[in-house]
Image (cartoon, rainbow, N blue to C red):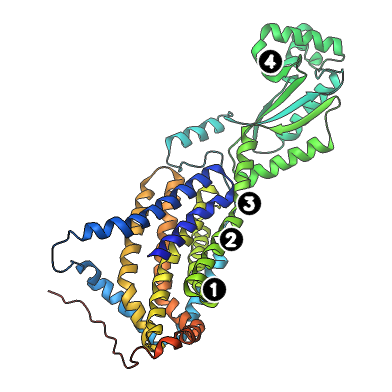
């Protein structure tokens, strides 16, 4: 119990490696809750059970027929030493890895709602109508004495607008030339041929004064002459990071290769900040998961006093992660902050079942039970509890799938998938792995204790009585 609480808590606490405050808080608070649950289970629960007056604790649920049949099937596989189990396991791992390569990184600006949400439908309708609430802002700053409404700077702004409009995710752009062009045409009796940019700084200053008199607020949003600052507003669709990040990279390359003639220009805005945040989360995904693997490996190595058995225990716990990738690849779910959260969580939860089986097997091996009998016995002893806890965890997280928030839906679905996969691997595959790779080590460590017990112990496990 102690080690299961520690490994699960480590799975959540590893999210601190992302260095994203939201994920750090989530991981640390959840890990603290798990450790507190363990503390109360070891102190308060025994006190409460001491008031239980019945002679026998009712545990009929653990003896249900479906549990018996499942555990007995797993125990028989463990005793028969089937090579088919390892072949099927390896084939499933290869298939899951193949499907996992289909997963693509893609994160939208509004990423917490599913497609059925009315808010998301409204946002899509606004974009289809030629508007959007998402912007990329090009911030320009004056250098020297030449103001940014100089004809050369205005021409640069128009060139940049033409450049970004070629990208399909751009809905439209707004900059200072969009205000000065119509004013120049209007002052020249509406002659369309005169609808060009100002030809001199003086003409630009006069048109800017007229613009401030007519639409002062809009001019201030685009240009503050006193501060020597201007901006170009690029209105974009919420097309996802798979398209948005290349667009932002192209904008940066343009600004670096063709800077404005009388100042500097950098891309900024909420859209840029959100995409940078998403990219940082995804960059820290593998380090966070690696941190969880290393920490849990250390705990299991210390627990079993064997690096070999610690590495062996990692095999069934990494497989659920491959299954998660396969499910994402088959269902078309992208890799994004709403989904990468589950990987560290799933890894911490999967370790619990492995510790149950491997810990019980070591106890039996230390007591002198030979490997051929210890493996089925370990499965029979731990199988009912593993199945019931996995069912409870799966049902608890499955409730989240009713939420309209996609992040909660994905956490519920993927955690349930990982819990079910962990049970299957730990009961039906892990005993065979122990036999092939870890039995010799376990027997070697069990030798000092062999003399303490009889080696002819008989191990039986009977089906529950039925009414």
Residue 161 seen anywhere in this rendered image of the structure: yes
In this picture, is 23 found above or below 199? below
Indicate which disc, 1 or 3, sits on the residue closer to the N terminus.
3
Q: Which mark is residue 290?
A: 2
> 158 and 437: which one is in front?
437
In this picture, is 5 found above or below 454? above
- For marks 4 and 2, give the CA distance: 49 Å
Q: Which residue is mark 3?
A: 283
In this picture, is 87 found above or below 343? below
Q: Position of residue 345 (x, y in %)?
A: 47, 56
Identify which residue is drawn at 38% across, 52% down.
Answer: 36
Q: Is 27 on the left or on the right of 243, as rendered?
A: left
Indicate which disc, 4 or 2, sits on the residue closer to the N terminus.
4
Q: Is 101 on the left or on the right of 390, as rendered?
A: right
Q: Position of residue 39 (x, y in %)?
A: 36, 56
Indicate which disc, 4 or 3, sits on the residue closer to the N terminus.
4
Indicate which disc, 1 or 2, sits on the residue closer to the N terminus.
2
- For marks 1 and 2, give the CA distance: 14 Å
Q: Which mark is residue 311?
A: 1
Identify which residue is drawn at 28% across, 76% down.
Answer: 69
In this picture, is 135 found above or below 213? below
Tell me whether circle 1 and circle 4 mark residues in contact (CB < 8 Å): no
SS under mark 4: helix
Q: Which residue is mark 4?
A: 220
Tell me whether circle 4 and circle 3 mark residues in contact (CB < 8 Å): no
């Amino acid at each position: 119990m102690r080690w299961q609480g520690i490994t699960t808590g480590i799975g959540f606490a590893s999210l601190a490696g992302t260095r994203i405050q939201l994920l750090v808080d989530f991981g640390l608070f959840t890990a603290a809750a798990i450790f507190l649950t363990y503390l109360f289970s070891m102190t308060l629960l025994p006190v409460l059970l001491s008031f239980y007056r019945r002679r026998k604790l009712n545990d009929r649920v653990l003896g249900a027929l479906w549990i018996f049949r499942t555990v007995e099937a797993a125990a028989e596989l463990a005793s028969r030493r089937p090579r088919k189990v390892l072949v099927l396991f390896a084939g499933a791992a290869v298939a899951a890895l193949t499907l996992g390569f289909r997963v693509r990184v893609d994160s939208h600006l509004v990423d917490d709602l599913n497609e059925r949400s009315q808010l998301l439908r409204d946002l899509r309708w606004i974009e289809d109508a030629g508007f959007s609430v998402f912007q990329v802002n090009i911030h320009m700053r004056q250098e020297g004495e030449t103001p940014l409404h100089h004809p050369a700077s205005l021409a640069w702004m128009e060139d940049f607008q033409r450049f970004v409009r070629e990208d399909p995710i751009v809905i439209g752009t707004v900059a200072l030339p969009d205000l000065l062009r119509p004013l120049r045409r209007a002052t020249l009796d509406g002659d369309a041929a005169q609808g060009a940019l100002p030809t001199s700084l003086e003409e630009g200053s006069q048109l800017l004064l007229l613009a401030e008199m007519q639409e002062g607020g809009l001019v201030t949003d685009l240009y503050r002459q006193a501060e020597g600052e201007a901006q170009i507003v690029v209105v974009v669709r919420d097309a996802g990071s798979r398209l948005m990040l290349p667009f932002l990279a192209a904008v940066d390359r343009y600004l670096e290769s063709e800077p404005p003639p009388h100042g500097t220009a950098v891309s900024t805005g909420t859209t840029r900040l959100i995409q940078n945040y998403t990219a940082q989360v995804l960059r820290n995904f593998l380090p966070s998961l690696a941190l969880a693997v290393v920490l849990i490996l250390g705990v299991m190595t210390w627990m079993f006093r064997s690096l070999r058995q610690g590495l062996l225990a990692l095999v069934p716990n990494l497989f659920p992660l491959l299954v998660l990738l396969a499910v994402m690849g088959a269902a078309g779910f992208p890799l994004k902050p709403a989904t990468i959260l589950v990987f560290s969580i799933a890894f911490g939860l999967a370790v619990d079942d492995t510790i149950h089986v491997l810990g019980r097997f070591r106890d039996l091996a230390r007591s002198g039970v030979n490997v051929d009998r210890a493996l089925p016995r370990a499965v029979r002893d731990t199988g009912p509890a593993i199945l019931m806890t996995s069912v409870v965890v799966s049902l608890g997280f499955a409730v989240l799938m009713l939420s309209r928030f996609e992040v909660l839906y994905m956490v519920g679905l993927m955690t349930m998938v990982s819990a079910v996969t962990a049970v299957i691997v730990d009961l039906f595959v892990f005993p065979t792995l122990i036999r092939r790779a870890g039995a010799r080590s376990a027997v070697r460590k069990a030798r000092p204790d062999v003399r303490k017990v009889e080696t002819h112990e008989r191990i039986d496990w009977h089906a529950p009585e039925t009414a």
